[in-house]
Amino acid sequence: MIEGIGHGKVILFGEHFVVHGAPAIAGGIANRAIVRIKRADNNSIVTKQKVVPEYSIAGINSVLGSLGVTEKYEVHLEGDLPTYGGLGSSAAFCVGLVRAVAKENGVKLNEDEVNKHAYNGEKAFHGNPSGVDNTIATHRGVVEFRRGTTPAESKFEFITLKTPMHLAVSFSGEYSATAKMVAKVQQFKDDNQEEFAQLVDEYLEIFALGKKAIETGNIEEVGRLMNANQALLKELGVSYEHNEKINAIALRAGAFGAKVTGGGGGGCCIALAESNDHAEKIAELIRQAGFESFATQIVKKD
Ligand code: PMV
């Protein structure tokens, strides 16, 4: 079967604040969606992962429509990127699918074209995606992202990663309901305008220092700022009990920083570790507490 690959992502800084105009920083992780296809009479999805088949089929239709391909495919989703939400798995799936279908049809696409078609697929999953996930699923690397009033006006800028970043990624057990959490933060903003503005100001300071720390390879400082970002997410009400529990285990195990990544309200957490071995150790302790957890790295731009 013909194969295409897309990478997962984590948000290091700025989930939720990015919805309200602040910049965020997201990074591609080593975990990948591997998409294998074969021609069939109808489009279908075959996977051991938890997916919503209607969304997957809609995503396949959108990708094929965007590529102008009229063939139909049995699409197999494999790889080591879990689909629990928060890790950009739908975007990684779309990128893998674009690459596989282009290859199968002898179409040569540059990376920007892969990204554009994958974005069209993402719309079937998320309606109005910001575009950060498909950009990272295509290029990997670390991206500073600013949302525009329309997705086309959103801006991405790659940040050079000075040193490898080792992470333990954990799943709270509750599938992240990003839209619900976005609505919750909007409510918080409506009810507490002054406090929200102050939290945004605090976040902007964290963002500026965080960007510098990534660029200079000051991992300890990145971790400290992740913790500061996490405190703000807690105030916004998107860090739930399981998120707090996971972060506490990671910090006790010597993580430089630990936070919710993505929408929160459950979903996923990340912990920044000193080395791959350290990330494995943190992940093991989190697994012992009953949560899924794995070690991974943020990977450099291709
Ligand atoms: O849960 P994810 O990985 O889709 O991330 C959501 C990030 C938010 O800032 C909460 C929402 C958004 O559209 O940026």
Image (cartoon, rainbow, N blue to C red):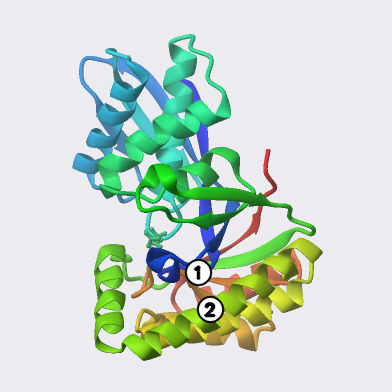
> Label 1 amino acid?
Gly
For disc 1, does the CB lie below 8 Å from ligand 1? Answer: yes
Q: Nearer the viewer, residue 25 or 279?
A: 25
Rendered position, 76 above or below 254: above
Residue at label 1?
14
- Asked if residue 203 lies left or right of residue 171, the reply is right
How many marks are shown on the rendered structure? 2
Query: Residue drawn 28% across and 65% down?
Result: 177
Give the percent coordinates (x, y) of residue 97: 41, 29
Give the label on residue 203, or none: 2
Give the percent coordinates (x, y) of residue 155: 51, 49
Query: Residue drawn 49% across and 29% down?
Result: 114
Rendered position, 252 above or below 69: below
- Asked if residue 88 lies left or right of residue 23, the reply is left
Marks 1 and 2, how far apart at CA: 7 Å
Q: Nearer the viewer, residue 196 or 223?
A: 196
Quadrant assignment for ligand 1: bottom left
In terms of secondary structure, where does tag 1 sit? loop
- Asked if residue 205 lies left or right of residue 231, the reply is right
Asked if marks 1 and 2 touch (Cβ < 8 Å), the reply is: yes
